[in-house]
Image: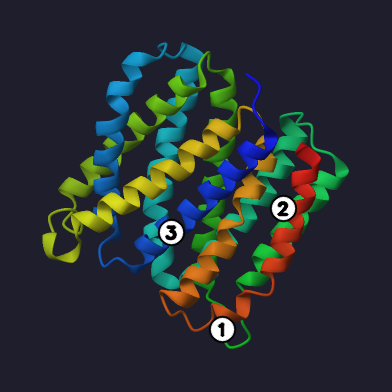
Amino acid sequence: MTLSVNFIFILILVSALCHAVWSAIIKSSKNPLSLMGITSVLEVTIFLPLTFTVPFPTLEVWYFLIATVIIHVIYRLNVIYSYRYGDLSYIYPISRGSSCLFVAIISILFLSSDISVAGFVGILIVCIGLFLISYAKNLSFNFRGFALAISTAILITAYTLVDGVGVRLSENGFSYIYWLFTLNGIPLLIIGLISKDGLRKRETYTFRSGIAAGVFATSSYAIVVWSMQFIEIAYVSSIREISIVFAAIIGMLFLFEKNAKSRIIPSILIVSGISVVYFQIL
């Protein structure tokens, strides 16, 4: 399958914007667990019928699907608790930036990825920009928030690599994607239904915000997994991190985070790093 690199690159940028909007919706919600529960309903409803249109995954691929479902459930719950201890433009860049670097290093050491020196430098520039964007002189170090952000980064690294390898091993990329979202939706839906802080607290959420969160979250990651079939996993991971820039802008303009504005300048580094990566995949 021959696709334009420019087309894939633009899709990853769209994915990044979707992810930033999803994060903002989760951050501003009084009951993020309920929104993730609604997201799960959407995932199962949309993707379960689609699984009948693609080949059934092989046993080898099922190992990856089971692993990623477990990691994703822990990740989503971790995100909820992480955002309680720091604003969006503090927690988000640390978790995404760290994972970007972890994915690159592991890809080079263990996956024999074709990442050039210039490509790695570009990824490193992105990571530096991501860490700088979370820095503010008037913001004291939040150890608990930082620890949760790093744990989130480890989970992001894990599911990114599992899904990147899994979708490449699959006979049909869409088969992996459809089963991924179908299975991902079930555990969190159950948690959302039985938890006293979930879907039962009807006054703390709206179905409109839940559906919006579901659409943005699902669209974002579906594009990412699909793109990893054609571009090195580490490159996709780093390009997607322009979502940090979008998140900072959203935090400043819509969530009124007082420290968000001071983090816009490091965005220049992020865009510069992504530009370097872009020219490596042409």
Residue 141, percent from left and from top: 57, 78
- The reply to whether dot 1 and dot 2 touch (C-beta < 8 Å) is no
Q: Is residue 156 above or below residue 243?
A: above
Residue displayed at 54% across by 39% down: 224
The CA span between labels 1 and 2 is 29 Å
Q: Earlier in the sequence, mark 3 or mark 2?
A: 3
Q: Is residue 97 above or below residue 186?
A: below
Q: Which mark is residue 21?
A: 3
Residue displayed at 17% across by 46% down: 193
What's under tag 3, amino acid-wise? Val
- Mark 2, residue position: 274
Q: Dot 2, how many residues are within 10 Å of its Cα: few (below 14), some (14-19), or many (20+)?
A: many
Residue displayed at 87% across by 44% down: 117
Q: In front: mark 1 or mark 2?
A: 2
Q: With 270 as the anchor, is 171 left or right in this view?
A: left
Query: SS of the residue at dot 1?
Result: loop
Residue 268, percent from left and from top: 72, 67
What's under tag 1, amino acid-wise? Ser
Query: SS of the residue at dot 3?
Result: helix
- Mark 1, residue position: 140
Residue 145, percent from left and from top: 49, 69
What's under tag 2, amino acid-wise? Ile
Q: Nearer the viewer, residue 155 or 90?
A: 90
Q: With 209 as the anchor, is 238 left or right in this view?
A: right
Q: Earlier in the sequence, mark 3 or mark 1?
A: 3
The answer to whether residue 232 is visible is no
Residue 55, image quadrant: top left
Q: Dot 1, how many residues are within 10 Å of its Cα: few (below 14), some (14-19), or many (20+)?
A: few
